Image: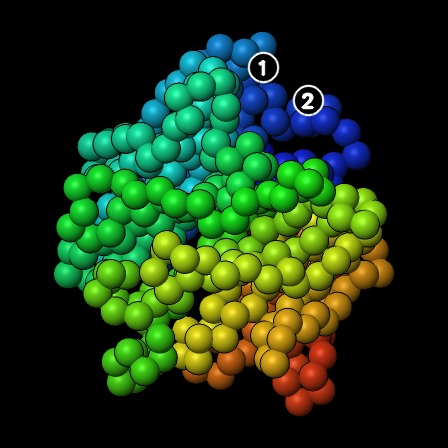
Amino acid sequence: TIYESNHYLYHTLPASVADFEEGIIAGRVMGEYSDMALGLYGNFCVVFTQSNATGGSSYLYLAYVNDGDLAIDELVSSYNEIRFPRVAVDSSGVVHFAYQTYGWNGEVRYGTWDDGSVTDELVYSEGSTDNPGAYLDMVVLDDGAGGIDRILVWSNELDEVMCGYMLDGASGWTTDVVHTADGAYNELVGYYCSLDICQEPEQLPPGPPPIRAPSAVGDTEYYVGVSFGVYSEFESVHWEVRACGSNDLDFWACDTIEYLEEPVTETVFRWRHSSAEPYILWSTDSGVYWSYYGDGWSTMEITAEGDHYGAVLDLCIDESTGEQYAIGNEGQDSIFGAYFNYELGEWDLDTEPIPDGHRVE
Protein backbone atom coordinates (compact mmCIF):
# COMPACT_ATOMS: atom_id res chain seq x y z
CA THR A 1 0.00 0.00 0.00
CA ILE A 2 1.25 3.48 -0.86
CA TYR A 3 0.07 6.37 1.30
CA GLU A 4 0.54 9.51 -0.77
CA SER A 5 -0.15 13.14 0.00
CA ASN A 6 -3.61 14.40 -0.85
CA HIS A 7 -1.99 16.89 -3.20
CA TYR A 8 0.35 14.35 -4.77
CA LEU A 9 -0.96 13.33 -8.19
CA TYR A 10 2.04 11.32 -9.39
CA HIS A 11 3.44 14.23 -11.34
CA THR A 12 6.95 13.36 -10.18
CA LEU A 13 6.77 9.73 -11.25
CA PRO A 14 8.37 8.59 -14.51
CA ALA A 15 5.50 6.19 -15.18
CA SER A 16 1.90 5.55 -14.21
CA VAL A 17 0.79 4.26 -10.82
CA ALA A 18 0.04 0.88 -12.39
CA ASP A 19 3.80 0.35 -12.86
CA PHE A 20 4.33 0.31 -9.09
CA GLU A 21 3.39 -2.97 -7.46
CA GLU A 22 2.94 -1.38 -4.04
CA GLY A 23 -0.05 0.58 -5.37
CA ILE A 24 -1.94 -2.39 -6.81
CA ILE A 25 -3.17 -5.07 -4.44
CA ALA A 26 -5.49 -7.83 -5.71
CA GLY A 27 -6.76 -5.57 -8.49
CA ARG A 28 -7.37 -2.62 -6.16
CA VAL A 29 -5.64 0.75 -6.23
CA MET A 30 -4.84 1.62 -2.60
CA GLY A 31 -3.96 5.04 -1.30
CA GLU A 32 -3.90 6.94 -4.58
CA TYR A 33 -5.22 9.92 -2.60
CA SER A 34 -4.64 10.38 1.11
CA ASP A 35 -4.15 12.90 3.89
CA MET A 36 -2.87 12.76 7.47
CA ALA A 37 -3.54 14.69 10.69
CA LEU A 38 -2.45 14.49 14.30
CA GLY A 39 -5.16 13.77 16.83
CA LEU A 40 -5.38 13.52 20.59
CA TYR A 41 -2.16 12.69 22.47
CA GLY A 42 -0.15 13.10 19.28
CA ASN A 43 -1.63 10.02 17.63
CA PHE A 44 -1.93 10.19 13.86
CA CYS A 45 -4.88 9.38 11.66
CA VAL A 46 -4.85 8.87 7.91
CA VAL A 47 -7.66 8.94 5.36
CA PHE A 48 -6.98 7.08 2.13
CA THR A 49 -8.85 5.90 -0.93
CA GLN A 50 -9.32 2.47 -2.44
CA SER A 51 -10.76 1.82 -5.88
CA ASN A 52 -10.99 -1.15 -8.20
CA ALA A 53 -8.38 -1.14 -10.93
CA THR A 54 -11.10 -1.90 -13.49
CA GLY A 55 -13.67 0.59 -12.17
CA GLY A 56 -16.69 0.17 -9.91
CA SER A 57 -17.08 1.28 -6.31
CA SER A 58 -14.58 3.55 -4.57
CA TYR A 59 -14.00 3.70 -0.81
CA LEU A 60 -12.60 6.12 1.75
CA TYR A 61 -10.96 4.61 4.84
CA LEU A 62 -9.73 5.99 8.15
CA ALA A 63 -6.61 4.51 9.75
CA TYR A 64 -6.00 5.50 13.38
CA VAL A 65 -4.25 4.39 16.55
CA ASN A 66 -6.47 2.50 19.00
CA ASP A 67 -4.91 1.22 22.25
CA GLY A 68 -1.51 1.16 20.63
CA ASP A 69 -2.66 -0.78 17.57
CA LEU A 70 -3.54 0.42 14.08
CA ALA A 71 -7.25 0.23 13.32
CA ILE A 72 -8.96 0.85 9.98
CA ASP A 73 -12.62 1.85 9.50
CA GLU A 74 -14.56 2.39 6.28
CA LEU A 75 -15.90 5.95 6.15
CA VAL A 76 -17.83 6.07 2.88
CA SER A 77 -18.26 4.24 -0.42
CA SER A 78 -19.34 5.63 -3.78
CA TYR A 79 -19.97 4.44 -7.34
CA ASN A 80 -18.07 7.57 -8.36
CA GLU A 81 -14.32 7.75 -7.78
CA ILE A 82 -13.35 9.33 -4.45
CA ARG A 83 -10.58 11.92 -4.74
CA PHE A 84 -8.80 14.62 -2.72
CA PRO A 85 -9.68 13.56 0.84
CA ARG A 86 -8.80 15.96 3.64
CA VAL A 87 -8.78 15.24 7.37
CA ALA A 88 -8.59 17.16 10.65
CA VAL A 89 -9.14 16.22 14.31
CA ASP A 90 -10.78 18.58 16.81
CA SER A 91 -10.09 18.89 20.54
CA SER A 92 -12.83 16.36 21.36
CA GLY A 93 -11.21 13.71 19.20
CA VAL A 94 -13.84 13.95 16.44
CA VAL A 95 -12.37 13.34 12.99
CA HIS A 96 -13.54 15.70 10.25
CA PHE A 97 -13.08 14.71 6.62
CA ALA A 98 -13.96 16.10 3.20
CA TYR A 99 -13.62 14.67 -0.29
CA GLN A 100 -14.67 14.87 -3.93
CA THR A 101 -16.69 12.25 -5.78
CA TYR A 102 -15.66 12.21 -9.45
CA GLY A 103 -17.92 10.81 -12.14
CA TRP A 104 -21.57 11.29 -13.02
CA ASN A 105 -22.89 14.28 -11.05
CA GLY A 106 -19.73 14.76 -8.98
CA GLU A 107 -19.97 16.32 -5.52
CA VAL A 108 -18.02 17.97 -2.73
CA ARG A 109 -18.85 16.18 0.53
CA TYR A 110 -18.00 16.48 4.23
CA GLY A 111 -18.36 14.11 7.15
CA THR A 112 -17.27 13.21 10.67
CA TRP A 113 -16.12 10.09 12.48
CA ASP A 114 -16.76 9.94 16.22
CA ASP A 115 -15.70 6.71 17.89
CA GLY A 116 -17.02 4.64 15.00
CA SER A 117 -20.12 6.72 14.26
CA VAL A 118 -19.94 8.29 10.77
CA THR A 119 -21.82 11.22 9.25
CA ASP A 120 -21.62 12.20 5.58
CA GLU A 121 -23.32 15.15 3.89
CA LEU A 122 -23.38 17.15 0.66
CA VAL A 123 -21.49 20.46 0.54
CA TYR A 124 -21.83 21.35 -3.14
CA SER A 125 -22.96 19.88 -6.46
CA GLU A 126 -23.55 21.35 -9.91
CA GLY A 127 -26.40 18.90 -10.40
CA SER A 128 -25.01 17.89 -13.80
CA THR A 129 -22.15 15.93 -15.30
CA ASP A 130 -19.63 18.45 -13.90
CA ASN A 131 -17.16 17.47 -11.19
CA PRO A 132 -16.51 20.24 -8.68
CA GLY A 133 -14.05 19.54 -5.89
CA ALA A 134 -10.65 19.08 -7.54
CA TYR A 135 -7.63 20.10 -5.42
CA LEU A 136 -9.82 20.29 -2.33
CA ASP A 137 -8.40 21.70 0.91
CA MET A 138 -10.00 22.06 4.36
CA VAL A 139 -9.47 23.92 7.62
CA VAL A 140 -11.36 23.11 10.83
CA LEU A 141 -11.34 25.79 13.52
CA ASP A 142 -11.96 24.67 17.09
CA ASP A 143 -12.47 26.92 20.12
CA GLY A 144 -11.95 24.06 22.59
CA ALA A 145 -15.47 24.44 23.97
CA GLY A 146 -17.50 22.76 21.27
CA GLY A 147 -17.50 25.59 18.73
CA ILE A 148 -16.46 24.28 15.32
CA ASP A 149 -16.04 26.11 12.00
CA ARG A 150 -15.51 24.12 8.81
CA ILE A 151 -14.11 25.82 5.73
CA LEU A 152 -13.32 24.20 2.36
CA VAL A 153 -11.83 25.48 -0.88
CA TRP A 154 -11.68 23.70 -4.24
CA SER A 155 -11.51 24.13 -8.01
CA ASN A 156 -14.77 23.91 -9.91
CA GLU A 157 -13.78 22.26 -13.22
CA LEU A 158 -10.82 24.72 -13.35
CA ASP A 159 -13.34 27.43 -14.30
CA GLU A 160 -13.43 28.96 -10.83
CA VAL A 161 -12.12 28.57 -7.31
CA MET A 162 -14.91 28.14 -4.76
CA CYS A 163 -15.21 27.99 -1.00
CA GLY A 164 -17.79 26.33 1.21
CA TYR A 165 -18.22 26.90 4.91
CA MET A 166 -20.42 25.97 7.82
CA LEU A 167 -19.67 28.15 10.81
CA ASP A 168 -20.43 27.30 14.41
CA GLY A 169 -24.18 27.27 14.97
CA ALA A 170 -25.08 27.27 11.25
CA SER A 171 -27.63 24.73 10.06
CA GLY A 172 -26.13 24.20 6.60
CA TRP A 173 -23.36 24.98 4.14
CA THR A 174 -22.80 28.30 2.39
CA THR A 175 -20.82 28.37 -0.87
CA ASP A 176 -19.23 31.31 -2.68
CA VAL A 177 -16.93 31.96 -5.63
CA VAL A 178 -13.39 32.98 -4.67
CA HIS A 179 -11.99 33.60 -8.16
CA THR A 180 -13.22 33.12 -11.74
CA ALA A 181 -11.11 32.24 -14.78
CA ASP A 182 -10.86 34.83 -17.55
CA GLY A 183 -12.36 33.10 -20.57
CA ALA A 184 -10.84 35.64 -22.95
CA TYR A 185 -7.41 34.21 -22.13
CA ASN A 186 -8.50 30.56 -21.86
CA GLU A 187 -7.55 30.55 -18.20
CA LEU A 188 -7.71 27.46 -16.01
CA VAL A 189 -7.71 28.26 -12.29
CA GLY A 190 -7.49 26.30 -9.07
CA TYR A 191 -4.60 23.88 -9.48
CA TYR A 192 -3.31 22.70 -6.07
CA CYS A 193 -5.50 24.90 -3.87
CA SER A 194 -4.24 25.58 -0.35
CA LEU A 195 -6.18 27.27 2.47
CA ASP A 196 -5.21 28.83 5.79
CA ILE A 197 -6.92 31.13 8.27
CA CYS A 198 -5.52 33.65 10.75
CA GLN A 199 -7.09 35.77 13.45
CA GLU A 200 -6.08 39.42 13.55
CA PRO A 201 -3.09 39.71 15.92
CA GLU A 202 -4.76 42.30 18.17
CA GLN A 203 -7.61 39.84 18.72
CA LEU A 204 -5.29 37.15 20.04
CA PRO A 205 -5.27 36.43 23.78
CA PRO A 206 -2.07 37.04 25.80
CA GLY A 207 0.66 34.44 25.56
CA PRO A 208 1.74 32.22 22.66
CA PRO A 209 -0.81 32.22 19.84
CA PRO A 210 -2.77 29.03 19.27
CA ILE A 211 -2.23 26.88 16.21
CA ARG A 212 -5.78 27.69 15.23
CA ALA A 213 -7.41 30.79 16.62
CA PRO A 214 -10.68 30.39 18.55
CA SER A 215 -13.97 29.93 16.74
CA ALA A 216 -15.93 31.34 15.11
CA VAL A 217 -15.03 33.21 11.95
CA GLY A 218 -18.21 35.25 12.17
CA ASP A 219 -17.56 36.46 15.71
CA THR A 220 -14.23 38.26 15.27
CA GLU A 221 -11.78 39.44 12.62
CA TYR A 222 -10.12 36.75 10.55
CA TYR A 223 -7.95 36.70 7.46
CA VAL A 224 -8.60 33.82 5.06
CA GLY A 225 -5.88 33.07 2.51
CA VAL A 226 -6.01 30.79 -0.55
CA SER A 227 -3.24 30.00 -3.04
CA PHE A 228 -3.45 28.06 -6.31
CA GLY A 229 -1.90 27.58 -9.75
CA VAL A 230 -3.20 29.08 -13.00
CA TYR A 231 -2.83 28.39 -16.73
CA SER A 232 -3.24 31.44 -19.00
CA GLU A 233 -2.79 32.46 -22.62
CA PHE A 234 -2.67 36.20 -21.91
CA GLU A 235 -0.02 37.60 -24.30
CA SER A 236 1.62 34.14 -24.40
CA VAL A 237 1.12 30.68 -22.89
CA HIS A 238 2.27 30.76 -19.27
CA TRP A 239 1.42 29.69 -15.74
CA GLU A 240 0.94 31.71 -12.56
CA VAL A 241 0.80 31.41 -8.80
CA ARG A 242 -2.12 33.42 -7.46
CA ALA A 243 -3.34 34.21 -3.95
CA CYS A 244 -6.74 35.44 -2.78
CA GLY A 245 -7.67 36.87 0.61
CA SER A 246 -10.87 37.69 2.47
CA ASN A 247 -11.96 38.72 5.95
CA ASP A 248 -15.63 37.84 5.53
CA LEU A 249 -15.68 34.80 3.17
CA ASP A 250 -17.72 36.92 0.76
CA PHE A 251 -15.50 39.54 -0.90
CA TRP A 252 -12.13 38.25 -2.16
CA ALA A 253 -9.11 40.25 -3.33
CA CYS A 254 -6.64 38.38 -5.58
CA ASP A 255 -3.01 38.93 -6.60
CA THR A 256 -0.67 37.22 -9.04
CA ILE A 257 2.45 36.17 -7.15
CA GLU A 258 4.60 34.96 -10.04
CA TYR A 259 4.46 34.44 -13.81
CA LEU A 260 6.06 31.15 -14.90
CA GLU A 261 7.17 29.28 -18.00
CA GLU A 262 6.20 25.87 -16.59
CA PRO A 263 3.23 24.49 -14.64
CA VAL A 264 2.78 24.87 -10.91
CA THR A 265 2.96 21.45 -9.23
CA GLU A 266 1.87 22.41 -5.71
CA THR A 267 1.13 25.39 -3.44
CA VAL A 268 1.02 25.70 0.36
CA PHE A 269 -0.47 28.84 1.98
CA ARG A 270 0.47 29.57 5.59
CA TRP A 271 -0.10 32.50 7.91
CA ARG A 272 2.24 33.40 10.72
CA HIS A 273 -0.57 33.81 13.21
CA SER A 274 1.22 36.09 15.66
CA SER A 275 1.74 38.77 13.01
CA ALA A 276 -0.79 37.90 10.27
CA GLU A 277 2.02 37.64 7.73
CA PRO A 278 1.21 35.42 4.69
CA TYR A 279 3.69 33.01 3.12
CA ILE A 280 3.35 30.68 0.14
CA LEU A 281 5.54 27.67 -0.57
CA TRP A 282 5.17 26.49 -4.16
CA SER A 283 6.89 24.31 -6.70
CA THR A 284 7.37 23.55 -10.36
CA ASP A 285 9.02 20.43 -11.70
CA SER A 286 12.35 22.26 -11.66
CA GLY A 287 12.34 24.03 -8.30
CA VAL A 288 10.80 25.03 -4.98
CA TYR A 289 10.11 28.66 -4.12
CA TRP A 290 8.98 30.73 -1.14
CA SER A 291 6.90 33.89 -1.53
CA TYR A 292 6.33 36.46 1.19
CA TYR A 293 4.50 39.77 1.46
CA GLY A 294 6.19 43.06 2.35
CA ASP A 295 5.40 46.17 0.30
CA GLY A 296 4.28 43.63 -2.29
CA TRP A 297 4.88 40.00 -3.03
CA SER A 298 8.49 38.84 -3.33
CA THR A 299 9.84 35.37 -4.10
CA MET A 300 12.99 33.55 -3.03
CA GLU A 301 14.34 30.35 -4.51
CA ILE A 302 14.79 27.49 -2.05
CA THR A 303 16.26 25.03 -4.53
CA ALA A 304 16.34 24.54 -8.28
CA GLU A 305 19.34 22.28 -8.73
CA GLY A 306 17.48 19.03 -9.41
CA ASP A 307 14.21 18.10 -11.04
CA HIS A 308 10.69 16.96 -10.20
CA TYR A 309 10.42 18.86 -6.96
CA GLY A 310 7.44 19.23 -4.71
CA ALA A 311 4.84 16.60 -3.92
CA VAL A 312 3.85 16.52 -0.24
CA LEU A 313 5.22 20.03 0.19
CA ASP A 314 4.69 21.56 3.60
CA LEU A 315 5.71 24.79 5.30
CA CYS A 316 5.95 24.95 9.09
CA ILE A 317 6.27 28.22 11.01
CA ASP A 318 7.46 28.54 14.61
CA GLU A 319 5.06 31.13 16.01
CA SER A 320 7.33 32.24 18.85
CA THR A 321 10.50 32.75 16.79
CA GLY A 322 9.21 33.10 13.24
CA GLU A 323 11.57 30.37 12.06
CA GLN A 324 10.33 28.52 8.99
CA TYR A 325 10.92 24.99 7.71
CA ALA A 326 10.04 23.52 4.31
CA ILE A 327 9.89 19.86 3.33
CA GLY A 328 8.98 17.88 0.23
CA ASN A 329 10.05 15.30 -2.33
CA GLU A 330 12.92 15.74 -4.73
CA GLY A 331 12.14 13.40 -7.58
CA GLN A 332 11.31 9.79 -6.81
CA ASP A 333 14.20 8.85 -4.55
CA SER A 334 14.96 11.79 -2.24
CA ILE A 335 13.32 14.15 0.20
CA PHE A 336 14.49 17.69 0.88
CA GLY A 337 14.35 19.76 4.04
CA ALA A 338 15.09 23.48 4.25
CA TYR A 339 15.44 26.01 7.06
CA PHE A 340 15.21 29.78 6.61
CA ASN A 341 18.25 31.45 8.12
CA TYR A 342 17.11 34.93 9.12
CA GLU A 343 20.65 36.16 9.85
CA LEU A 344 21.81 35.37 6.32
CA GLY A 345 18.43 35.94 4.69
CA GLU A 346 18.57 32.66 2.81
CA TRP A 347 17.43 29.06 2.93
CA ASP A 348 19.71 26.27 4.14
CA LEU A 349 18.97 23.06 2.24
CA ASP A 350 19.57 19.39 2.90
CA THR A 351 18.46 16.28 1.02
CA GLU A 352 18.18 12.66 2.12
CA PRO A 353 17.54 9.50 0.10
CA ILE A 354 14.27 7.63 0.57
CA PRO A 355 14.82 3.88 0.95
CA ASP A 356 13.56 1.81 -1.98
CA GLY A 357 12.24 4.87 -3.76
CA HIS A 358 9.12 5.17 -1.59
CA ARG A 359 7.80 8.66 -1.02
CA VAL A 360 6.79 9.88 2.40
CA GLU A 361 4.39 12.40 3.86
The reply to whether callout 1 and callout 2 are in contact (CB within 8 Å) is: yes
Q: Tell me: 159 left or right of 260.
A: left
Is residue 209 visible from the viewing direction of this image?
yes
Front position in the image: 91 or 201: 201
Which residue is rendered at x = 35% and y = 50% of the image?
Answer: 151
Q: Where in the figure is residue 335, as x and y percent of width and height?
A: 69, 54
Q: Is residue 287 above or below residue 58?
A: below
In this rendering, is residue 112 above or below 246?
above
Amino acid type assigned to the residue bearing label 1 in the image: Ala
- Callout 1: SS: loop
Furthest-bottom residue in view? 343
Dot 2 amino acid type: Ala
| Residue 347 x %, y % | 70, 75
Residue 276 in picture, x, y percent from top left: 44, 75
Q: In which quarter of the image is residue 10?
A: top right
Q: How crowded is mark 1: few (under 14 residues within 10 Å), some or many (20 or more)?
A: some
Q: Coloured how?
A: rainbow
For disc 1, the marked residue is 53
Q: Which residue is nearer to you in this view: 96 or 66?
A: 96
Residue behind mark 2: 18
Left-right relation of 206 to 341 = left
* Horizontal side of residue 130 vs 223, given as left or right: right
**Residue 279, percent across and down?**
56, 68
Question: Residue at 24% of width from left, 61% of height from top?
Answer: 218
- Where is residue 248, by image quadrant? bottom left
